[in-house]
Image (cartoon, rainbow, N blue to C red):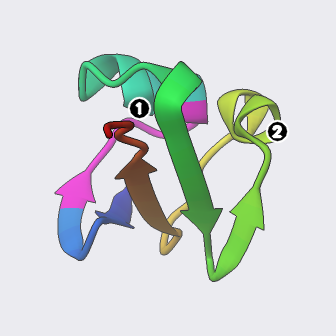
Amino acid sequence: MKVVVNGATRELPEGMTGEQLLTSLQLSPAALVVELNGQVLKTSEFLAHPLVEGDSVELVTVVGGG
């Protein structure tokens, strides 16, 4: 299935969850803001969400500093 992740189309396995996507991208959900199809989600909601053909995912990492 084709899913857009941060503006790039990716071919992903059917039924892949948000958690599996983050694992494949080597991203930690702890410091992440997730937008799915234009809606900001709690990371916990995204982890269990099964992705479907045509989804658009934006992943933004939170960086602290001072």
Residue assigned mark 2 = 45
32 or 7: nearer the viewer: 32
* Above or below 50: residue 30: above
Residue at 67% x, 29% y is: 47
Looking at the image, is 53 positioned above or below residue 11? Answer: below
**Regarding mark 2 in the picture, which secondary structure is present there?**
helix
How many other residues sit within 10 Å of disc 1, few (<14), some (14-19) or many (≥20)?
A: some
The earlier-in-sequence mark between 1 and 2 is: 1
Disc 2 marks a residue whose amino acid type is Glu
The span shown in magenta is 10-18
In percent of width and height, residue 20 lies at 47, 22
Q: Is residue 41 visible?
A: yes
Rendered location of residue 45, percent (x, y): 82, 38
Q: Is residue 16 visible?
A: no
The residue labelled by disc 1 is 21
Identify the amino acid type marked 1: Leu
